[in-house]
Amino acid sequence: MAFAAKFLLALAALGIAVIAMLATFQTALLFPRALVGPAPDLPADTQRLELARENGDVLQGVRIRGRDPARPVLLGFGGNAWNAEAMALFLHQIAPEHDVVTFHFRGYAPSTGRPSASALMADGVAIHDLIAPEAAGVIAVGFSIGSGVAAHLAAERGIARVVLVTPFDSLSAVAQQLYPFAPVRLLFRHEMNVQEALTRSTADIRMILATRDEVIPPARATALVSALPDAQAIRLESGHNTIYNHPDFVSTLRAAFK
């Protein structure tokens, strides 16, 4: 009996330690800046952009010009370990008719500051307001965690379309499903509620989902689709990262911009 009690106490202590570690390091887990890869070579006419924020942080971005200035600008928000310039080139190669604008997330070099869900979502709106006056419309494109930024923008500004790749309904729901033993609602500091944002948006919604997503539990994408009956959702047989190698991915994403 004494051994069993000691074992249960040790197990409880271990659980508390794991929960405390997750709570302490959640920012680093969500925004792994050290894992971001190098920037690729961009077209020679790529424009460098800069946006100063109210607290003194400065965001750095790029604009790659498209062949048709009458097309909407593709405003991209990448995954949590993506290089924004690599994303810009990727979108440009898929849709060369469109101008493409991407910014490094706050705290992701060369942008300054510290990343957080609230900061990234506010920055997304500010970036939109920077480019919208000279744009023939804006299509927000969000990949993975960038879906939260794109959805928030769609709720705050009257953009015509939002395109989401491997999205989720809310980050807290993702965290709760991944760590069912943790009191996520009490400890989570980086909520991005895609479902709530998109129910407030009038944008045309297009989604591309991975059926075997090992990062975003498929149940979270299913919940999002169920809550948005007017959205167009296409499922590809792939994982979270392997979706980009699916033979139909490029054509599906390209079609979502039309």
Image: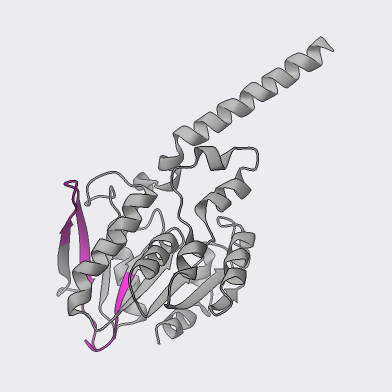
Expressed as whole percent of the image width and height from the top left, the position of residue 146 reads 41, 61
The stretch of residues the image draws in magenta is 50-75
- Total number of numbered labels? 0
Q: Which quadrant would the N terminus be assigned to in this image?
A: top right
Quadrant position of the C terminus in the picture: bottom left
The answer to whether residue 237 is above or below residue 11 is below
Question: 11 left or right of 65?
Answer: right
Picture layout, residue 112 above or below residue 19: below
Q: Would residue 40 be seen by someone viewing this image from the given angle?
A: no
| Residue at (28, 47) in percent of width and height | 107
- For residue 109, above or below residue 159: above
Front one among 148 and 249: 148
Report whether 26 appears left or right of 159.
Answer: right
- Nearer the observer, 81 or 205: 205
Q: Does residue 166 appear in the picture of this structure? A: yes
- Tell me where residue 176 appears, x and y as whole percent: 60, 46
Task: Point out the residue furthest to the top here.
Answer: 2
Instruction: Please identify the quarter of the rendering in which residue 80 is found.
Output: bottom left
Q: Residue at x 31, y 57 (%)?
A: 122
**Magenta region includes residue 62:** yes
Quarter of the view holding residue 52: bottom left
